[in-house]
Image: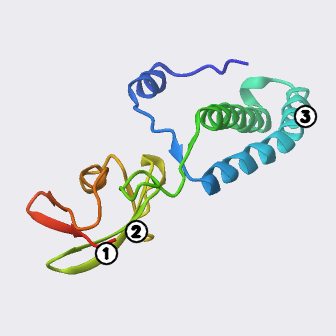
Amino acid sequence: MRIPMRKAEQERLENQVVDHHMTAGTLERLKAELARLQREHPEAKEEMQRTAEEGDFSENAGYQDAKRRLRGMNSRMLRLQERISQAVVISDGPIDGSIGIGSTVTVQNTHGEKTFRIVGSQEVDLERGWISHASPLGSSLLDKHPGDTVTVGTTTWTIIK
């Protein structure tokens, strides 16, 4: 089923670079959300049909609300199906000791030590120490080993482990 889309939204989606890397936990969360929406979909469809029977569409707020909810559900389900089908699950990093997507890295600079996990762009969470592999620090750390140093801007980081 194809959902109508505004031109501005379509252009935004076409120009968006999507990173399909995600942890297994995120993939499971997306699958659970899709399953929940699929369970709720028939009820939302029935609600729209029931409110449509109430008469004039232009003045039927219940119908407009039910239609908006159903359209949002359909759109979200399509996006979830696409993300799930294109997912690249992140492991714990390369086994050769180098740093890759999924690695947990401890680095040190003049301000002290920090530990980061390198993840996909959609999972960045600085409070948890999750940085993107596409970020300046994340991309600098890729393929490095403990003992190597990387410079990002004016800060030099030494890889501890």
Q: Is residue 147 above or below residue 34?
A: below
Residue receiving disc 2: 129
Residue receiving disc 1: 114
Q: Which residue is painted at 38% across and 25% down in the image?
A: 15
Quarter occupied by residue 85: top right
Quarter occupied by residue 127: bottom left
The answer to whether marks 1 and 2 mark residues whose Cβ atoms lie closer than 8 Å is yes
Q: Is residue 75 above or below residue 154?
A: above
Image x and y of residue 73, in percent: 71, 37
Give, as a three-letter code, the residue at label 1: Lys
Q: Which residue is painted at 77% across and 24% down in the image?
A: 57
Image x and y of residue 145, in percent: 29, 60
Q: Residue furthest bottom?
A: 112
> From the viewer's perspective, is 24 left or right of 141?
right
- Measure the alpha-carbon separation of dots 3 and 2: 44 Å
Q: Nearer the viewer, mark 3 or mark 2?
A: 2
